[in-house]
Image (cartoon, rainbow, N blue to C red):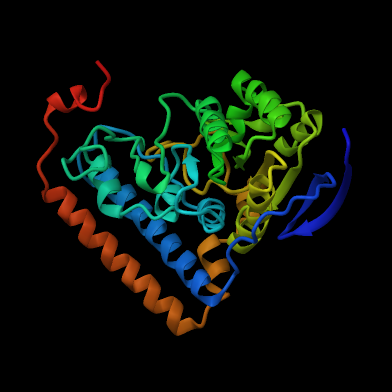
Amino acid sequence: MGGRFYVTKIGKHEMKKQTKKTDSAAAPGPALTQELLESMFYRMALARHLDTIMARHTKEQRFDGFWHSGEGQEAASIGATAALRPDDYVFYQGRGAGWAIGKGMAPAGIFGDLLGRVTGATGGKGAGSPHWCDPAIGVMGDGATLGSVYPVAAGAALAAQLRGTGQVAVADFGDGASARGTFHETMVSAAAWKLPLIYFCENNGLIVSMRLAEVAPTENIADYARGYGIPGVIVDGQDAVAVFRVMQEAVDRARAGKGPTLIEAKVVRVRGHYDGDPQQYRRPDDPDLVGYRDPVELLRSHLPDKVAQSLQARAQQEIQQVYEAACAAPVADLSIIWKDVYA
């Protein structure tokens, strides 16, 4: 496969990676400054409080869709997006709001779409499971089926390569979606063409209500990378700083023309598959829950207490105000389904 594998520690987990000699070098990514840590923490606090508000709304108000909580998985999306440029492409999975907020999307557009209001990023089309988008900052939307991100993310990466823009594309997915044929099909071409594409798996070990171990031939999704001759990286997905460092290396590698990386973030799904899920398949003493460390508190430990408290209070206030404004906004008219559609 033209390279060598070595093992090092990234966060809590081992990182297995393949490298190849090259004369080209990418410009270094953003430095992990105090300013960046504060930005990451603020965005994580926004995502967490939005999740809290949606859980309450789903329970107390009429909600015509489903809310798939991202609580416990925020470090993966916030750490990953912190290593991206504003014009890089993100194709995310539908759990929580971390990817959109991490990329810089305004919570007003997110809440508007969740509640079917005209203030939504898509004018209210995305009520329920998140389908918001903001192409101006590279948030390209969510597909209609889980795991549909692979071909479109590969297409975006190919377009960036042909244009020579230096952009990268990220295909975010859950462990269950790694069984889709398009995951492997696109990886063949992406590896052969050295596309600037990053496969980012949030592995919480659960496929809705079934455990990954019951249906997968390998414990680690990152192991699949070996068959395609690309790096396979395992990182502690509860540690935003560890995720940032791994993602930054993958981004730099992609911009240097060295091709894709498969990152697997080991995360914990704190709540059910959807809000209201009775979780009869789960016990309080399940190993993943016992070993859970709150990503918000882990990132908070990198900041002075007063700074963290101030940022958290600001985030809660912003989310509450945006939520109230979304509730008061007009409901989208059904005619919106005909807008933004090719004729």
At a point 69% along the width and 41% down the height, the residue shown is 261
172 relative to 216, above or below: below
Label count reads 0
At a point 29% along the width and 33% down the height, the residue shown is 65
22 relative to 260, above or below: below
Left or right: 285 in relation to 71: right
The image shows residue 164 at horizontal and vertical percentages of 56, 41
Left or right: 332 in relation to 92: left
The image shows residue 85 at horizontal and vertical percentages of 50, 54
Quadrant including the C terminus: top left
Observer-nearest residue: 4 or 174?
4
Left or right: 257 in relation to 169: right
The image shows residue 323 at horizontal and vertical percentages of 22, 54
Observer-nearest residue: 75 or 89?
89
22 relative to 37, above or below: above
Quadrant including the N terminus: top right
The image shows residue 324 at horizontal and vertical percentages of 17, 56
Observer-nearest residue: 104 or 287?
104
Q: Residue furthest top?
A: 343
At a point 45% along the width and 24% down the height, the residue shown is 145
